[in-house]
Amino acid sequence: MAKYVCELCDYTYDPEKGDPDKSVSAGTAFEDLPDDWVCPICGAEKFEFQKLE
């Protein structure tokens, strides 16, 4: 699964870790995050993230 980085603060969403603070389980792909999920650091919405190549 691909990692995604926030264009505003450089936070990297790693699907192997998920986002336990927001009840997102490890193994959750970025595409499967809830629509209302936001960056845990700066609050950016999903469209502000870019896939890491």
Image: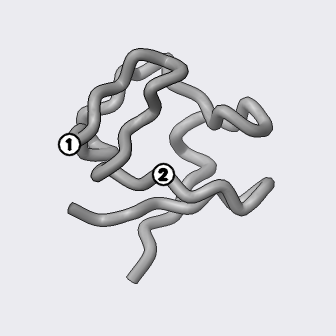
Helix, strand or loop at disc 1? loop
18 to the left or right of 11: left
The disc labelled 2 sits on which kind of residue?
Tyr
Which numbered circle lies on residue 44?
Answer: none
Q: Which residue is mark 1?
A: 27
Mark 1 closeness class: few <14, some 14–19, many ≥20 residues within 10 Å:
some
Q: Is residue 21 above or below residue 4?
A: above
Q: Position of residue 37 (x, y in %)?
A: 50, 24
Tell me what residue is drawn at x 66 percent, y 32 percent: 40
The residue carrying pointer 2 sits among few (fewer than 14), some (14 to 19) or many (20 or more) residues within 10 Å by Cα, namely many
Whole-percent x, y for residue 45 in the image: 61, 34
Identity, as a three-letter code, of the amino acid under mark 1: Gly
Residue 16 percent coordinates (x, y)? 29, 52
Q: Spatial distance from mark 2 to mark 1, Cα to Cα?
A: 11 Å
Residue at 41% x, 55% y is: 14
Q: Secondary structure at mark 2?
A: strand
Figure quadrant of the C terminus: bottom left
Which residue is tagged 2?
Answer: 13
Q: Nearer the viewer, residue 27 or 35?
A: 27
- Residue found at x 56% / y 58%: 12
19, above or below 6, in the image:
above
Question: Which of the colour schemes (rainbow, by chain, secondary structure, one colour) is used?
Answer: one colour
